[in-house]
Image (cartoon, rainbow, N blue to C red):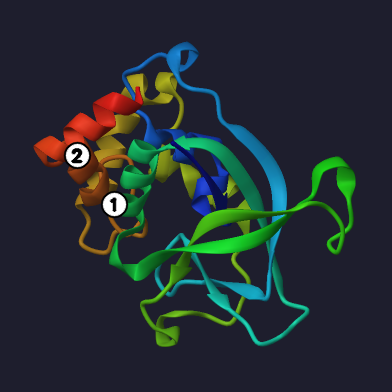
Amino acid sequence: MTHTAFFYGTLMATPVLHRVIHNPTIPSSLLPTLTTRPAILQNHTRHRVRHADYPAVVPSDDQGACVRGVLVSGLSDADIWRLDVFEGEEYERRRVRVRVLDGGEEEGEGEEVDAETYIWIAGAERLEPQEWDFDEFVREKMRRWVGGSEEERDSGFKDVDDAVAALQNDPTGGRGFNGQITRALENGSEAGKTMIRSAV
């Protein structure tokens, strides 16, 4: 069975998504192919999470509210399991309808499809009113999530990643290259390991 999911935050960055759902030791040429398309989730708003690099999306009564993101098709059951672990207890995976923006359609146009997404459930008091900025994340923060390029890791960035993950105030919320959630994914239960192996 395959799944379709809408991502609106750090998982819009391909290196972050692949780091979560795939064993990083497997060559990219052997990874299953995913289909990615721009999309919009309507009647929701995206916010910065206080003291974190990642955003939250919550339903909105404002009929004009919408969140741009990416629709990813071809995810396996094991991918969804890993994504659930990655998102943790702050989010709940829910079914939503999103509008695909293939071919440069306007926000009100395009095919509407079913997808799953992660809705923030950890309380509005932890959210800032400002919109989360994907470009800023990629430019200033993504390196500590995925450890930079292979060349950078080989030249000593792994030590920096380890140090960042060890900090008590980890801005990745444990989701970084060597964070507690990544370690849990890599050292999960036997059932989880079996599911992960079946995905690759």
The quadrant the N terminus occupies is: top left
Q: Secondary structure at mark 1?
A: helix
Image quadrant in which you'd find residue 22? top left
Image quadrant in which you'd find residue 61? bottom right
Q: Is residue 33 visible?
A: yes
The circle on residue 192 is 2
The amino acid at mark 1 is Val
Q: Secondary structure at mark 2?
A: helix
Q: Nearer the viewer, residue 198 or 39?
A: 198
Residue occupying the point 58% across, 42% down: 72
Image quadrant in which you'd find residue 89? bottom left
Q: Residues within 10 Å of mark 2 (few under 14, many from 20)?
A: some
Residue 152 in percent (x, y) is at 41, 25
**Residue 119 relative to residue 187: left or right:** right
The residue mark sitting in front, 1 or 2, is 2
Residue matched to label 1? 85
Residue 18 in percent (x, y) is at 45, 33
Q: Residues within 10 Å of mark 1 (few under 14, many from 20)?
A: some
The amino acid at mark 2 is Gly
Alpha carbon distance from label 1 to label 2 = 10 Å
**Residue 110 relative to residue 80: left or right:** right
Residue occupying the point 37% across, 39% down: 77
The quadrant the C terminus occupies is: top left
Residue occupying the point 29% across, 52% down: 85
Residue 14 in percent (x, y) is at 54, 36
Q: Nearer the viewer, residue 32 or 136?
A: 32
Q: Nearer the viewer, residue 172 or 94?
A: 94
Q: Would you place residue 156 above or below residue 162 in this image?
A: above
Residue 53 in percent (x, y) is at 45, 60
Are the residues tagged 1 and 2 within 8 Å (C-beta)?
A: yes
